[in-house]
């Protein structure tokens, strides 16, 4: 018989603001937190990334104790309670982050203000050691070996890492490719999304495949679905771009917002056909986080303000939290932590990818005590293993 405990803390990474003409940093990126269920939630800063003009991604480890942040040219590992930096690794163009059993995977891409084009890197996908962020590996930007253009979103399905490759920093030269890395062997393959699937900005594992939300050349929105590394479907869903704004999984569907629309659209992940609207807060959202009973939407004017609206699943706004400028990433500790009496290495047909103790260290399947079990389909559970 298991037990459940509520966890309601949200973490918000605010990108800050910069004068793009002078290069002056108007507000440095900052990390803050608030209690989602408080009657009047208050954003509390726990770290300011002084000297950085931008911060791209934020993820929380399975224990809820450690954060990883990609801030322009550095990846940080941080204490989630205090904001204290535990480790850091210089890495120019760090974009999105994803945790595996022993690594932090990082996609790369950046804009060159002198050439007005994309910065060229030898590797657009790299792996850092999860414990100390030391360099572990990089996939060379060579055909058949690794992504050859600026890359963005990642997700894991059935032991395969999927990477959205978009070349989005080269205006008019966007590409639409989903790369795939076998996490066991490191083998790399690609699927071309075709001319209607340019510029994938979000990836989601759903219904046995991977769905991308594509911004095209910032003039339309399309959805693509990839199964087992092969393209099965791309569908244009709007003649207006989704940009790099909000999208997520909501229930059984993909939810995303098209520029200029106050509500959201839902799509079936297998067929990509419309599943109807979702009301949202009536505003353009810059970021989105979905929990089991709430949706958090980040909004900003990119110059002076930032806020996060907390909504229920029906779209009713419950509270608004003032934050730093441009809240670009929001993560919430698991709404429910399930504590079971025992652990099986394969539960309900899901393949176990990794297991960690309460300090975030990898542990074996026979070790007694509390641990987090992470599955290849992206799910995670906290369980308790009885001693033999």
Image (spheres, rainbow, N blue to C red):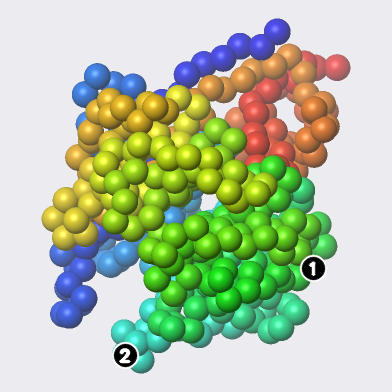
On the picture, is 65 further left or further right than 351? Answer: left
Say if 66 sits above or below 2 in the image.
below
**Residue at numbered disc 1:** 187
Q: Helix or strand or loop: what does disc 1 sit on?
A: loop
Q: What is the x, y in percent for residue 106?
A: 56, 63
Residue beneath the point at 59% across and 83% down: 122
Q: Is residue 32 above or below residue 121?
A: above
Give the quadrant of the N terminus: top right
Q: Which of pointers 2 and 1 lies earlier in the amino acid sequence?
A: 2
Residue occupied by mark 2: 114
Q: Which mark, residue 270?
A: none
Nearest the viewer among 60 and 301 is 301
Q: Residues within 10 Å of mark 1 (few under 14, many from 20)?
A: some
Give above or below for 388 relative to 227.
above
- The residue at 41%/82% (across/down) is 171
Q: Tell me, yes or no, if residue 129 can be seen here.
A: no
Which SS class for mark 2?
loop
The C terminus lies in quadrant = top right
Q: Residue furthest bottom?
A: 115
- Please report contact status of discs 2 and 1: CB closer than 8 Å, yes or no: no
Q: Work out how far the residue at label 2 is from the one at label 1, CA to CA, in angstroms.
A: 35 Å
Q: Position of residue 206 (x, y in %)?
A: 65, 44
Locate residue 146, reporting x and y percent.
68, 75
The quadrant in which residue 365 appears is: top right
């Amino acid at each position: 018989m298991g037990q459940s405990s509520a966890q309601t803390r949200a973490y918000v990474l605010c990108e800050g603001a910069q004068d793009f003409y002078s290069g002056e940093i108007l507000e440095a990126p900052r990390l803050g937190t608030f209690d989602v269920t408080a009657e009047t939630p208050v954003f509390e800063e726990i770290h300011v990334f002084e000297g950085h003009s931008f911060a791209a991604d934020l993820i929380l480890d399975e224990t809820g104790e450690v954060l990883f942040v990609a801030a322009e040219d550095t990846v940080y590992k941080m204490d989630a309670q205090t904001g204290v930096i535990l480790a850091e690794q210089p890495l120019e163009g760090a974009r999105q982050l994803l945790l595996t059993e022993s690594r932090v995977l990082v996609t790369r891409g950046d804009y060159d203000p002198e050439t007005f084009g994309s910065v060229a890197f030898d590797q657009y996908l790299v792996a850092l050691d999860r414990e100390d962020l030391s360099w572990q590996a990089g996939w060379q930007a060579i055909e058949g070996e690794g992504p050859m253009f600026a890359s963005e979103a990642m997700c894991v399905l059935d032991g395969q890492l999927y990477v959205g490759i978009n070349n989005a920093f080269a205006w008019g030269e966007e590409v639409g490719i989903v790369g795939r890395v076998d996490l066991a062997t490191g083998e790399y393959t690609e699927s071309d999304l075709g001319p209607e699937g340019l510029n994938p900005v979000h990836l989601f594992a759903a219904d046995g495949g991977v769905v991308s939300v594509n911004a095209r050349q910032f003039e339309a929105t399309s959805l693509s679905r990839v199964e087992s590394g092969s393209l099965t479907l791309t569908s244009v869903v709007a003649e207006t771009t989704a940009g790099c704004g909000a999208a997520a999984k909501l229930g059984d569907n993909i939810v995303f917002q098209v520029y200029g629309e106050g509500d959201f659209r839902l799509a079936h992940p297998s067929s990509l056909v419309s599943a109807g609207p979702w009301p949202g807060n009536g505003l353009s959202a810059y970021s989105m986080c979905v929990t089991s009973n709430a949706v958090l939407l980040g909004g900003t004017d990119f110059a002076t303000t930032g806020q996060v609206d907390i909504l229920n699943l029906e779209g009713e706004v419950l509270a608004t939290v003032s934050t730093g400028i441009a809240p670009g990433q929001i993560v919430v500790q698991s709404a429910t932590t399930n504590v079971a009496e025992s652990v099986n290495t394969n539960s309900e047909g899901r393949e176990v990818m990794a297991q960690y103790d309460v300090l975030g260290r990898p542990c074996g399947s026979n070790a007694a005590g509390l641990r987090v079990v992470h599955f290849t389909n992206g799910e995670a559970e906290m369980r308790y293993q009885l001693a033999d």
